[in-house]
Amino acid sequence: MPIYEQTYRAYDGKPLQGFRWWVMVKQELRILFGTRAFVYLLIVAVIHTSFRVFQITVYDMVSVSSQTPALMALKNVAMMQVDERTFFDYLRIQSSLVFIVTLFAGSGMICNDFRDNLIEIYFSKPLTRLDYIAGKTITLVLVGALLTAIPDTLLVVLHNLLAPGRETLRETYWIPFSILAFSACIVLPCALGVLASSALFSSERYAGIAVFMILFGNSALGTALPELVRNPNFSIISLPMAVNRVGETLFAQPRKSFPLHWGWSALFIGLVCAFCCWALASRIRRAERAS
Amino acid sequence: MSATLDKVEAMPAANAPYLRFLAMSAHHALVTTLRRKRTILAGVVALLPVVIPLVLTVFTEGAFGREGNKIFVMLMEDIYVKALLPLLAMFFGIMLIGEDVESQTIPYLLTRPVPRSAMVLGRFASLLLIAAGLIVPGVFLTFAACTALGNFAFSAANLRLMLHYDGALLMGLLGYGAFCMWLGAFFKRPIITGVMALFFWQRLALYVPGLIDFFTIEKYVVALLPPLAEAREAPMLRTALAEYQKKLFLVGATKSAIALVIIASVLILLTVLVVRRREYSQAKAMES
Amino acid sequence: MSAIIEAQGLSKWFGEVVAVNNLDVSIEPGVTGLLGPNGAGKSTFIKLALGLYSPSRGTMSVFGEPPRNNLRVLRRIGYCPEFDRFPENTTGYEFVYWLNRFYGMTGAEATRRAEEACERVKMTERMDDLIETYSRGMRQRIKIAQALAPSPELLFLDEPMAGLDPEGREEMFALIRELGENGRAVIVSSHILYEIERVTSHVVLLHNGCILARGRVHDMRELIDEHPLAVTVGCGSPRDLARHFAEDGATLSIEFEDGRVTVRTRDPNGFFEKLNRLVADKAVDVTSFACADADLQSVFQYLVR
């Protein structure tokens, strides 16, 4: 009787056509939305969005129809004004939540697969390493987009619906592109960083702490170093500040952060993403070989 | 499996002394933590501030030559106290009990006749030892590196300042460490709770006017710091500002130290209660 | 014999799931098999006895005391869990050594007992390797070693045969039997009936958190009088043998097969008495006989049905 190897083997048949990573995305999203704590975090995000909806509604209703002096005065209150800064601020505030939610959703995504020997099972299916990484990353990007790009773009649409006209359109047509780019700058390093940490650490908790430690330590250094060397450009070593610098440019905001050209910040963000991708891919590659 | 049952005699009926359990628990936690590669990561992070004054020495004398004192104080207060201390407490504290919960090995320990309080206290002692073992040399190396810059000699007064910071950091470690250990034992996802409590709530509470900042650990740690450390050479000003600080924070250094000890004691007690009462086991999920 | 474990009205539920439902059971020294399909409540019962869970209702006592957070009880207990989890970056020896230390042993004693326990489970050669490098069977052995090391009076073995190869299983069966013979109380849980049958005839049958039956397998079989006992007898003249039993009112059916005859009877005791008599009188030449459905599998199926 012939004896065959009984361990899991990488699938060596012809890969199936289509978006194979979508299976991973669906599975991860199903798990996440089945977690109560995750839903609570999303509800927290809704609170901020609701405030912005209120702000835009009041502002637009006042600008379009009201002649009441009190309401006109309200329109001039800086906090209630709606312009590109509103959408920029929305994303900036959401970025903290994006980090928390990504940490919640992503820190166990890969290390738990390692712990439960799921990697071997995944790679014994018609699923490549790229599909696996793409599936995990896209899940986190979608979750991030759910907190940033999607609601912010909807706010722009709401603004246009409540204050219809060529002027509003002229003022806001470019904002969705900026939202998309800025959201990518917020979400991508966050998602890739958390996934890389999850791949490198064997424990979900350590993965979470490590990524937070690096980000927070990096921000602390980014705050202290410019003061110590009396050169604000050293702020670029802080990832949140670099992201902010790109955001200022994308939303045509007056520069409040360091004066260095925004391109350097974009390059820094790109390098962080590339490093995380490399760490992630090399760890998964090793696991695939081992399986 | 060999049939040699008679070789192993039964355990004596009397339990071992409490202190042996305490020392053994600390020893075990110390050995396992020090062996982990991730402890090296924590060590690297703890020693990062040392690099800053060293890098600055490369710059010209004119730019940073007179800044040693200022740089040391800034590194201590902004980096060590506000960033590194809670980070290291989180890194080690959350996993003290949490690691066994997460890796589902806690039933091995809970089926041993070890007093739960000895287990928790022993592990907490190991946290203090390891974190202090990273922070104290880090502070000393930062101090030594800052003396390479001007206006900061290797003098007794400056050494006292360094020891003052060491003391404040260790007291802070007591509070933060106990808090993180409790988080790790109590919450299923302690990282998110820890990040929110230590880095969002503490920041928010310190900005909000009123007495809300009494519900933070940072308030008591900051109150322990040497008042106006940068201008400590002027005793009159120092005394006046110390009084001002006391009024501003509504607590002096002694009260803060007592508050931190009370916070740590209460949280350790809560952790013991959690470990005694919580039904840590994976079977719940499996069976349901 | 006084009971080591006693449960009265014991229930445990997790949310809406009832894992153990109103159990009244007492377990005496010796080897006891805890038997039931997955989700029957075996592990929950063991965890209640270990004090890892507190009962939702009812009482549980081990050595006459409630086990939860009770160091006196825990000192007399050993536990080999069903889960395959170990501390990270630890060798087999260190694993057993540190768990010995948690018994309050001195370093020297913990070392000696760890080495002896590793030897007993034939892990001496590999005990200094990291557990991550062990096979499933080795991990199972090292788990058993940590449970045996303090030489406890009461040993809980939750699915101890999982992952062991046939040779390992046989060794495990022998070890469990020997522990029982030496006066230790051993509670072995399994969902595989054959495994329990190999180590003990005393079983507690659990299903959906309830006790279906408790006692000796053979006694249980007799209780199920509505189910006939099928006995296959090998003999030189099957027809002669069949003729003796065909007259019996308790016989339900007789089947012939290659020098063997299978008799289904409603009165097992009467059948065996008659068979003994026939053999003694040399009326039939019996070469073999086996009860076709007296094993636990049949008992369990009958009871569940």
Image: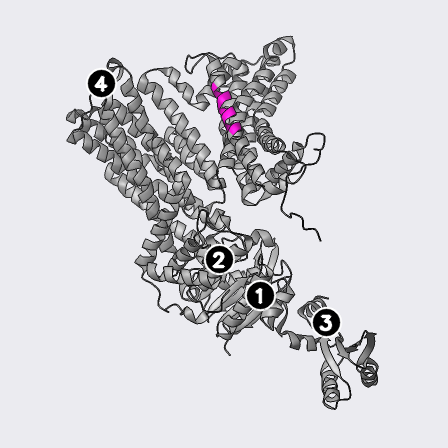
- Residue in view at x 33 percent, y 19 percent: A227
| Mark 2 burial class by Cα count in 10 Å: few <14, some 14-19, many 20+ | many
Do the residues under discs 2 and 3 have CB atoms within 8 angstroms?
A: no
Name the one closer to the observer, A106 or B137: B137
User: Residue C215 in the image: x percent, y percent?
Assistant: 61, 74
What's the distance in space between the residues labelled 3 and 4, CA to CA?
A: 94 Å
Residue type marked 3: Asp
Give the mark toward the camera: 3 or 4: 3
Name the one closer to the observer, C64 or B91: B91
User: Residue A217 in the image: x percent, y percent?
Assistant: 39, 29
Looking at the rendered structure, whether the residues under marks 3 and 4 are on a common chain is answered as: no
Residue type marked 2: Ile
- Residue in view at x 60 percent, y 32 percent: A139
The label number, if any, that marks residue A36 in the structure image = none
What's the distance in space between the residues labelled 4 and 2, CA to CA?
A: 62 Å
User: Quick check: can you spot residue C283?
Assistant: yes
Name the one closer to the observer, A157 or A21: A21
| Magenta residues, start to end | A268-278
What's the distance in space between the residues labelled 4 and 1, CA to CA?
A: 79 Å
| Mark 4 burial class by Cα count in 10 Å: few <14, some 14-19, many 20+ | some
Chain letter of disc 2 in the image = C
The label number, if any, that marks residue C293 in the structure image = 3
| Mark 3 burial class by Cα count in 10 Å: few <14, some 14-19, many 20+ | some
Q: Secondary structure at mark 3?
A: loop
Judging by the rendered image, the residue that carries numbered circle 2 is: C142
Left-right relation of C238 to A20: right
Quarter of image, res C293: bottom right
Do the residues under discs 1 and 3 have CB atoms within 8 angstroms?
A: no
| Mark 1 burial class by Cα count in 10 Å: few <14, some 14-19, many 20+ | some
Left-right relation of B111 to C270: left
Judging by the rendered image, the residue that carries numbered circle 1 is: C170
